[in-house]
Amino acid sequence: MHHVRAPLLSSDEIAPGHFLMRFAAPRIAAEAQPGQWVHVRCSDTWDPLLRRPLSIADVADDRQSFFILCRLVGRGTEKLVAKRPGETADIIGPIGHGFDLRQVAHSTPQRRPAVALVAGGYGVAPLHLLLRTLREQPGTDLTAAVFIGAETAERLLFLQRLDELADELHTATVDGTLGHKGLVTEPFQATMSSRPADVAFSCGPTAMMAEVARICSAHSVPCQVSLEQHMGCGVGVCLGCAVPIRADGGVVYRRACCDGPVFPGELVAWEDMA
């Protein structure tokens, strides 16, 4: 990981309270992998004290800059989104173990591997970079079904870009303002029952990812989940982001910040997640 002072290049409110921010940081952008994140100091003072963990949502084509999706939720993010282009932020990254792309088989003349990506609200950020990377991976011609859900239509993020990258785009909103009315796991389950994917990736609320993992297990489909945990230090010392993982017939705790944030869905002890 690198510790840099990165200039802000742009900041756009792409949905109410959601800002896509682009920082110039060639060393971070050059090494960033889907599922990794950065630790950002929100202001130039010690208020707030702790950094904020933010997923890397995309990287520029020239690998000179990267994008984060920042959701306005409190004093820290309020200070961060108040920055203007030309101002800088203290950033550490890229951090963590991201998605394992080796589970996506290479295509053959007879078969194209099928992947499913299931995102809930803000959890779309790492999946956007994942799908773009899969599309650009040499030797892989795949079919991608994207399932994205949110409370309302205005909170469905990256829709145009995902529509360009996906073979199928399924939307779900709790209030029914766009796509399926209900939870995003419902169209995902219906699709998996008729056309199971070869591998699934997911990020979003814990309950959603637990259901995605259950559906995948029922169809013997490997699943990778990016766990959204509160992270304090970001380097594995404070243990504030510990998550229960099944191992050797029991449950052990792993650090989401550096052992994850991506884990096999079938290994997460969902009933013990806070």
Image (cartoon, rainbow, N blue to C red):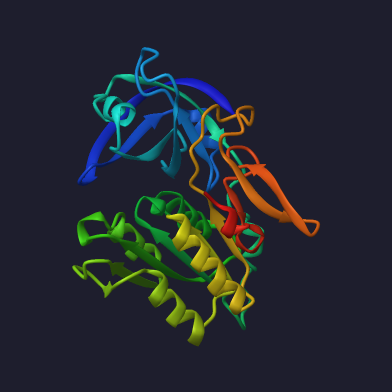
Q: Quadrant of residue 48?
A: top left
Q: How many numbered circles does the render carry?
A: 0
Q: Quadrant of residue 57?
A: top left
* Residue 130 in the image: above or below residue 184: above
**Foreground: 139 or 191?**
191
Tell me what residue is drawn at x 35 percent, y 61 percent: 162
x, y (%) of residue 229? 50, 43
Q: Residue furthest right?
A: 248
* Residue 152 in the image: above or below residue 54: below
In the image, taking residue 170 as reference, residue 211 lies left or right, namely right
Tell me what residue is drawn at x 39 percent, y 77 percent: 187
Q: Residue furthest bottom?
A: 194
In the image, taking residue 234 as reference, residue 25 lies left or right, namely left
* Residue 171 in the image: above or below residue 19: below
x, y (%) of residue 114? 54, 74
Can residue 135 be seen?
A: no
